Amino acid sequence: MNKILFIDVGTCRGSEFSSAMKIWSNMDFLLIEPNPKNYQFLLKKFGDNKKISMWYRAVSNKTGVKKIYVRDIDGKEYTDGTTFHNEIPEMITSKQKKVFSINTISTTDLLLPLKDKYEKIILHLNCVGGEFDIIEDILHCEECKDINLSILVRFYHHPQWLNCPQAYKSVCKGMELDNIHYVEHRTVAPKITFLEGMKRLMKEINHET
């Protein structure tokens, strides 16, 4: 059995993931990215690394097909992220945006086949609002309680994004009640970079073991 799998949901172009891979190279990595331009970029950058698997799809609370939105800047497809949430102010005010269909996998369909292959799974969520459905899916899954899971998450609950403080409080409380180990990284005060959050999470994991 391999020790740790790092699943990166919303890898974009891999800048955050790359910093983690340099420090914790003993892990296996699964990169999941729904933006086709970003996915092709990742294939070229990491395709020869046998420790890295890559999926072109999105993670949601259901396996199937969903509409996903990409912001355009001056007619050029924005390469830093996609979202299921067209109601985000940045999407509403964007002069140009694209919508396309993407295959999705539910969090439970993603995690359950892996629980006996790895001693530990780290789930990194940076998916512009999709984190709420993903975490709720985990919280409603009894079998997921058997997974040794830690979550590193950037929440998009602030007014400039989804403006959903109650949803944020609900999923945080749910994770605490289910004893799911999680760490946030933030771009708003108090700021915590991805790498700072990852180091904190790994320190706590190593302390557990």
Image: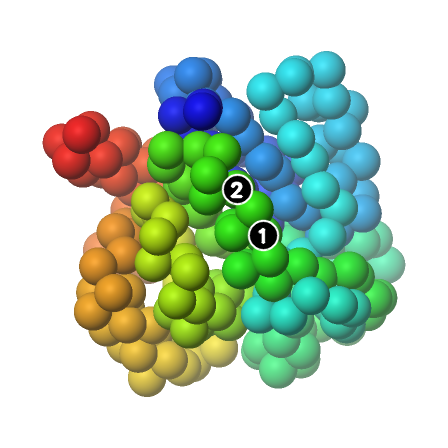
Q: Do the residues labelled 1 and 2 touch (CB within 8 Å)?
A: yes
| Residue at numbered disc 2 | 114
Other residues around mark 1 within 10 Å, as few (<14) / some (14–19) / many (≥20): some
Which residue: 46% across, 39% down? Answer: 116
Q: Which amino acid does label 1 sit on?
A: Leu
- In the rendered view, would you say 13 is above or below 88? above
| x then y, percent, for residue 2 | 45, 24
| x then y, percent, for residue 153 | 39, 54
| Residue at numbered disc 1 | 110
| x then y, percent, for residue 33 | 67, 47
Which residue: 34% across, 58% down? Answer: 145
Q: What element carries label 2?
A: helix
Which residue: 62% across, 25% down? Answer: 52
**Left or right of 183, for residue 51:** right
Q: Which amino acid does label 2 sit on?
A: Leu
Quarter of the figure with the C terminus: top left
| x then y, percent, for residue 90 | 60, 72
| Residue toward you, 3 or 15 | 3
Residue 119 falls in image quadrant: top left
- In the rendered view, would you say 196 is above or below 90? above
Residue 197 falls in image quadrant: top left
Q: What element carries label 1?
A: helix
- Which numbered mark, 1 or 2, is in the foreground of this view? 2
